[in-house]
Each structure stands twice: as structure tokens, then as C-alpha cells.
């Protein structure tokens, strides 16, 4: 099936640091979504992107839909302890109908607090 | 409050047993989805339904079955044919296909 490459797999944050993660694919996507998942809970939608080049913010979070439509990044500025968790990117392939409207998920970036 | 409710939170299955996971939404969404999540993995699609009385297999449908008799309900049955059922199961819905999906809080299934 289709693959999304999400990196880094994990990272440690210190309060106040900026964080950056990205997703890339060989396929062109119609939509990019970013989710955050806390342990034992379902993913929560953070940001949705619909147009190539689009830059969208949600508080301290900023995400961009890559110009080539094959990548997206998420930045977290001035991180705080409650930012820890797993962040997933998800892309929807171009076209509708059949399975085209379904999401493809990256494997996640796990944010932990620096010891 | 509008949302997606999954139950139970934890479920145990004996060998050879079928178990059913519940998913209910009161968001009036047309599309519903079931995913399986294993440690360190992304979400893998089991089944999806774009409208009542219709559903399609996802990437890993073997050993699972679903029904969509009502718009708000999309139960998943893990059958005895699923040899490795231990996982975290997530249900999601979207207003229609292709729109952002919203998730329930999951059911963790374990083998006794």
C-alpha cells in the first residue's frame, strides 16, 4: 500500500524549545492532516491543510502543505510539558470515490521530555 | 456533547471466541472507519463505510467483520479467524468521505 515517511521517529524536548517534524511521500496528496495522540486515547485533530503551499497555525502549532503536494511539516514553538505524546501525519490521496478518499497515516513522532 | 463513543475500553478474548467492539457517533456523520494500531505503528485501516448499509474492506480486513445498519453505529467483530487480535482498535467518523476524520478513545483488546 501507500507509504508515508514520518520523521523523526522520536525526539526529546526541553521546555521552551521549538520542535519540528515532517512527512514525505512519493504520492501526491489532496489533504494533509496532523493529529496528536496521548497514551490510551484516540488521536485528536490538530490542523488540516487543503492547498499546496498553505501555512496554517493553531496556537503554538504551525503546519505547511508542501508545494509539491508530497510533503508536510509541523512545528511546535516554545514547547511545554503537555506537548508530549505521539504526533501523526495523515494524507488523503488525490481523487474521490472508492478508497481514494481514505487516509494514509505516518508511523508517528513520539515526543518525550528530556531527562 | 457530540462525539464518538467506543466501548468497552478494555476487552479480553478467549481462544476461538468472537468479540464485538462498539462504536457510536452522534455527529450525524455519513462515513465511519475502523483502524488497528500496534505499538510503534501507524494506523491501519480495517473496514470503512461511506453510507448506511454499505461498507468496504480496508488494508487488513481478514479476520474481521462489520455491519452498518444505522447511521450512528458501526460495530466491529473480531472473529476467531484473526490469529493476532491483540491491539488497540480505533473507530473514526467524518462528515462524508474525504473529510477530516475524528476518533473515539479506542478499545484495547487482549487475549486471555
Image: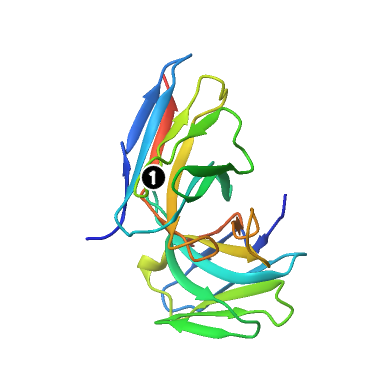
Task: Give A7 or B28, whichever is nearer the viewer.
Answer: B28
What is the secondary structure assignment of the residue under circle 1? loop
Residue at position x 32%, y 39% from top?
A: B9
The image shows residue B27 at horizontal and vertical percentages of 32, 59
B66 relative position to A81: left or right: right
Q: Chain of mark 1?
A: B
Tell me if residue A35 can be seen. yes
The image shows residue B21 at horizontal and vertical percentages of 38, 34
Height in image: B18 above or below A100?
above
> Where on the picture, by quarter, is residue B67?
top left
The image shows residue B46 at horizontal and vertical percentages of 56, 41
Residue at position x 61%, y 64% from top?
A: A91
Residue at position x 55%, y 76% from top?
A: A49
A99 relative position to A49: left or right: right
A104 relative position to B92: left or right: right
Height in image: B10 above or below A13?
above
Task: Give A71 or B26, whichever is nearer the viewer.
Answer: B26
Which quadrant is home to the C terminus of chain A? bottom left
From the image, tell me which residue sits under label 1: B106
B47 relative position to A15: left or right: right
Task: Give B2 or B96, whichever is nearer the viewer.
Answer: B96
Residue at position x 48%, y 28% from top?
A: B78
The image shows residue A106 at horizontal and vertical percentages of 61, 58
Tell me if residue A115 can be seen. no
Height in image: A81 above or below A62?
above
Amino acid at each position: 500500500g501507500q507509504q508515508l515517511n514520518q520523521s523523526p521517529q522520536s525526539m526529546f524536548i526541553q521546555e521552551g524549545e521549538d520542535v519540528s517534524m515532517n512527512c514525505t511521500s512519493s504520492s501526491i496528496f489532496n489533504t494533509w492532516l496532523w493529529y496528536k495522540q496521548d497514551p490510551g486515547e484516540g488521536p485528536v485533530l490538530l490542523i488540516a491543510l487543503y492547498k499546496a503551499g498553505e501555512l496554517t497555525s493553531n496556537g503554538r502549532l504551525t503546519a505547511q502543505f508542501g508545494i509539491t503536494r508530497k510533503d508536510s511539516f509541523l512545528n511546535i514553538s516554545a514547547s511545554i510539558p503537555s506537548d508530549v505524546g505521539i504526533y501523526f501525519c495523515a494524507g488523503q490521496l488525490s481523487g474521490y470515490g472508492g478508497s481514494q478518499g481514505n487516509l494514509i497515516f505516518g508511523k508517528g513522532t513520539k515526543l518525550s521530555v528530556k531527562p | 456533547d457530540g462525539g464518538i463513543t467506543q466501548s468497552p475500553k478494555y476487552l479480553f478474548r478467549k481462544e476461538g471466541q468472537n468479540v464485538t467492539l462498539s462504536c457510536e457517533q452522534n455527529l450525524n456523520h455519513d462515513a465511519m472507519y475502523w483502524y488497528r494500531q500496534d505499538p510503534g505503528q501507524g494506523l491501519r485501516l480495517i473496514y470503512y463505510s461511506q453510507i448506511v448499509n454499505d461498507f468496504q474492506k480496508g488494508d487488513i480486513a481478514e479476520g474481521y467483520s462489520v455491519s452498518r445498519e444505522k447511521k450512528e453505529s458501526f460495530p466491529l467483530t473480531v472473529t476467531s479467524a484473526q490469529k493476532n487480535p491483540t491491539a488497540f482498535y480505533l473507530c473514526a467518523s467524518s462528515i462524508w468521505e474525504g473529510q477530516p476524520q475524528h476518533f473515539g478513545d479506542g478499545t484495547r483488546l487482549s487475549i486471555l
